Amino acid sequence: MRFSDWLVLSCLRVVGDRPCVSGMVGYTESITDPSYEGQILVLTYPLIGNYGVPERPTSGDDLPSEFESSRIHIAALVVGSYTDDYSHYLAHSSLGTWLKEKNVPAIYGIDTRALTKKIREQGSMLAKVLARRPEIPPGRLLHLLPESRSVSRSSSPPSPSSWRDEYIDIPFHDPNEDNLVAMVSLQSPRVHAPTGAPRRHPSGRLLRVLAIDVGMKYNQIRCFTNRGVELKVVPWDYDFLADPEPYDGLFVSNGPGDPTKLDVTIGGLRRALEKADRPIFGICLGHQLLALAAGAKTSKMKYGNRGHNIPSTDALSGRCYITSQNHGYQVDTESLPSGWKELFQNANDGSNEGIYCESKPFFSVQFHPESTPGPRDTEFLFDVFIQNVSDCVSTGALVPISLLEKSTEDNDKRSSRVNVQKVLILGSGGLSIGQAGEFDYSGSQSIKALKEEGIYTILVNPNIATIATSKGLADKVYFLPVTPEFVRKIIKYEQPDGIYVTFGGQTALNVGIKLKDEFARLGVKVLGTPIETIITTEDRQLFAKAMESIGERCAQSNTATTTEEAIAAARDIGFPVIVRAAYALGGLGSGFAQNEIQLRALCSKAFATSPQVLVERSMKGWKEIEYEVVRDCRDNCITVCNMEVCTNSSIVRAMSLTDEQNFDPLGIHTGDSIVVAPSQTLSDADYNMLRTTAINVVRYLGVVGECNIQYALNPSSKEYCIIEVWRC
């Protein structure tokens, strides 16, 4: 099946397995991941190359954070759209330049959605990337042109009977039939010293983990050394049971290919399980090898799981994690021997994502807790393993693993379902910045969800031109202003069990804050995000203190309730400053002040709409990044999307190169915005650094439901500041 005749970057001919990977970032990490050895990598994200490629590793001894090995492992790259125009402070060249340097063919102009659909329907398959014969002119396929139409005025070769004749063909070859692990594993042992605070054995030596390299990623090494562990990495066929140097735990890395072909590694692990004198932890291929050594079976999946947003459920606690995955084989849960149980399960297809031994500290996971690329949500598993190693050496006994989460039963008791029969929803009212169409959407969706649960819904919203107020959606609609007086009267008359104040934007939030001391007396329970959390996010001073308490960075700022206080704050911080009003809609009273005169003018507007302003260090020229975050009462937390916001001076660049990018000055929402979502110029490290921060902040604040967190990101470094959390 032919997908494109646009071969770019080089004219090599390659054949290999064809995995499709969903991920908005991380192409440099994926391309250098040893798990992709010999494979034709298809990136389903529509635009690739936006943030370029950093400077390449200078030697095999380096562990640069932007790469996962010392070389490119893919056979070829296939993308939908590609750009040579990149924007990132670490970028050294374009992606195309890097691939040309390494003679790796790549092709763009592919309908990757159609390609993914074909694989979904027919399963994983071999593929070829072929080069056009040199005598064939570029452009449209000759055999598709009408015979009566000349390609050019000059003579041309006769038209082939098939498009295949225009390309230099090569036979298919299945890379999984090769020992791919032998190609990617190191050749001799290597020791990596701890980079974090050293952990020590009771004897005084460094705590050491021995890692079997069956295709090990750099970030797995970092995850150990950053936690103070000395890591000795050995080849795939190394006799680690006869290692003359002491070690305290055994780790089995990720890697490519069919796990059943690694008899030597499986045999060594089987003997290690029988000996049972150290904790063992495996990831991806290491998970499959540990399962085979324990007596379970593996099988090839129809199309595998490859992406950065795959949900995996903890079988012990019921907690769901968003994981990064890259595998075409799976462990068959039904084949697990006695004493072994499932630890994680894929929430999409039900496939196995982890196993553990009930009596010994042996466990493994199919997904990648080290990520890179992908979310860092399960990196805590390295802490679990290292703590278990430490506990075992300190007690002299093997202690079964214990995850950080409570059991499903405990979680049920901690977060029991709220029993409500009638719920009042505060709508958005007139659409404006701070309570625009997104609140009409979220409000209408909340009504649908409540009605699915059999809950009677009441909406108060004076705007008849909204979806939420449509006939037949809510059970009852009050076309009244969203004010404390009217809401109080409706509660007294309708006597609802619960109320939502988070689906109406700023006006609804302000009403919730004003009535917070009356809700209990009125017999109504606030559902979703607690009012205390809303107050913390709305009050600039409280929010800054909350972020400081968890070590997160906000811009240097001071709150003020008078113009003179604002001027004093600006003198302390230094001009220029940004002034942002609290409890205000759409950036009212907010703006930049270059001097005291401009500050006084801003304050006169701000204090007309708000009792408090925040005077903050100006960060003009920085990227403004936003993440939409959703958290439930069980502490499951995901980011829905992310965006970048641009200043007026970077309009052209904003339109072509960023996430969600606005024409607004950073931190001010006037509605004069152009948004590109999701991210385009954030690398995997940038994207997931801010994503992890967003989740940490939302969990600390106790948000239940959806909210938006905004950052200022220095375009020349990883320095960032949290601007605000809003729409809780």
Image: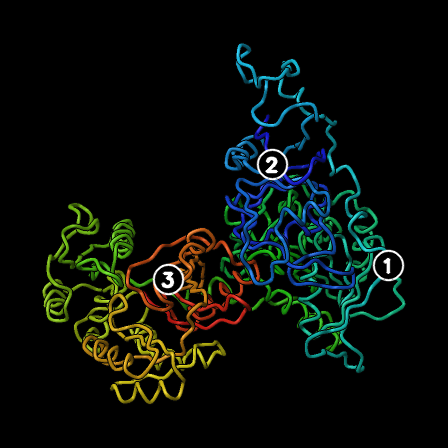
What residue does disc 1 label? Answer: 188
Q: Identify the mark nearer the N-term, 3 or 2.
A: 2
Amino acid found under the numbered disc labelled 2: Lys
Q: Could you tell whether 105 is left or right of 239 in the image?
A: left
For numbered disc 3, what is the local secondary structure? helix
Query: Can you say whether 10 is above or below 529 in the image?
Result: above
Which label's residue is closer to the chain start, 3 or 1? 1
Rendered image quadrant of residue 666? bottom left
> What whole-number distance in Å separates the C-alpha atoms at marks 2 and 1?
35 Å
Which of discs 3 and 2 lies nearer the camera? The answer is: 3
Left or right side of 509 for 224 = right
Q: Nearer the viewer, residue 558 or 237?
A: 558
**Quarter of the image containing the C terminus?**
bottom left
Task: Give the image location of residue 491, x and y in percent.
Answer: 14, 66
Q: Which residue is mark 3?
A: 648
Q: Is residue 499 visible?
A: yes
For mark 2, give the secondary structure: strand
**Which secondary structure lies at badge 1?**
loop
Label number found at residue 302: 2
Q: Callout 1: 10 Å neighbours few (<14), some, many (20+)?
A: few
In terms of image quadrants, where is residue 458?
bottom left
